[in-house]
Amino acid sequence: MKKKPINVAIVGLGFGAEFIPIYQDHPETTMYALCQRTEASLHEIADHFGVEKRYTDFQAVLQDPEVDAVHINSPIHLHAEQSIWALKAGKHVACTVPMATTIEECRRIVEAQRASGKTYMMMETAVYTREFLYVKELKDQGNLGRIQFLRGAHQQEMAGWPGYWEGLPPMHYATHAVSPLLALAGSEADYVACFGSGRIEKRLADRYGSPFAVESALFRLKDGITGCEVTRSLFETAREYVESFDVYADKCSFEWQRLERELPILFRGENGERVEVPDYANLLPGPIRKYTKNGVYDDADHQHLSFTQGSGHGGSHPHLVHEFISSIQEEREAFPNAVTAANWTSAGLCAHQSAMNQGELVKLPNFEPSSS
């Protein structure tokens, strides 16, 4: 028997607005409600998309019995508490990255999800881009062979973004660079050693007590075999925006392009060739396939910086929505679930801890349930 559509409430309408029409067009969802603290902005966006139910108070959203799921796109310091409140209120939760800002918050979300039995999904764009899906397909078909090493980078100039971003430690927002490596390796991060490099201006450094312009980490994975390297910068480092990953394996290797207008390179032995990566819209329900290539607004002036600056996050947005909704309807864990999201997020948190302590080796916490 066909299950009833999921009533979704989107919380935060900066980046969050990019998802409104995807939920409207998904065959198993109702775009039920929008929540935004600024009332004028709330009505402008809700009017634009024709959404009737509107809230300026997050708690009121949770008290609405018609809301089945919340998609949280609020400032990062609110991710943990809003996720926990929503899970305790019996709502399914999708939350943009990072999961939280401390390891303790990650642990509390895992515990809240376990206690509630509801779905939690961290909406990590990097593991649903067309590039990731292409390399995952190579792996699943046996064309990569044995993965030997992985490298990820996320370099971005965030001057001019909302004030809470200013001076943020680079590795506190590392999931875009970390997640594709761990997902392709099929393992979690176990240990990390990280070094900071360069300096940002004092005004920025004083905000979070983090002086580094760049943080670069080496991870040892739980499989005991694979190593990963991750580089992250947020301020005062000249570079075109990039969220990239490289995969080196014994049969075939993949390297991200240096410039956005170029194509990535696939190596077989020592021979490399540029490759056109397919779109993978065919993996989605027909009504939302168009969103792998188009933003949700009619003109670029209204699109969120995270969409325009990152080339639409590699077409990932409709894949994220479909995975979240499918996991609820099929009563299974989403990918990434709470435990995986906690590992991916704490990988960066522990990396920054290492950088602040001269590169000391840090073991990541375990978020799996106790066997006792």
Image: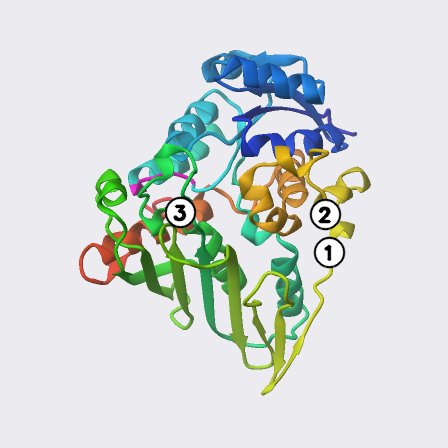
Quadrant of the rendered image containing residue 280 = bottom right
User: Which circle's residue, 1 or 3, is located before the other in the chain?
Assistant: 3
Give the mark toward the camera: 1 or 2: 2
Relative height, residue 220 to residue 302 (above, below): below
Tell me, yes or no, whether the highlighted magenta stretch contains residue 102: yes
Question: Which secondary structure dominates the residues rendered in magenta?
Answer: loop
* Cα distance in 3D space between marks 2 and 3: 25 Å
- What's under tag 2, amino acid-wise? Lys
Residue at image position (46%, 67%) is 151
Residue 279's disc is 1
Q: Secondary structure at mark 1?
A: loop
For badge 1, the amino acid type reads Asp
- Is 97 placed left or right of 350 in the picture? right
| Residue 232 x, y percent position in the rendering | 39, 57
> Callout 1: few (<14), some (14-19), or many (20+) C-alpha neighbours within 10 Å?
some
Q: CA distance from mark 1 to mark 2?
A: 8 Å
In the rendered image, residue 261, in percent from the top left (x then y), is placed at 63, 62
Q: Residue furthest bottom?
A: 270
Query: Does any portion of residue 333 appear in the rendered image?
Result: no
Q: Secondary structure at mark 2?
A: loop
Which residue sits at x=29%, y=38%? 104
* Residue numbers of the magenta segment: 99-103
User: Pointer 2: residues within 10 angstroms few (<14), some, or many (20+)?
Assistant: some
Separation (CA) of disc 1 from disc 3: 26 Å
| Number of numbered discs visible in the structure rendering | 3
Label 2, on which residue?
Answer: 293
Q: Nearer the viewer, mark 2 or mark 3?
A: 2
Q: Amino acid at mark 3?
A: Tyr
Marks 1/3 in contact by CB < 8 Å: the verdict is no
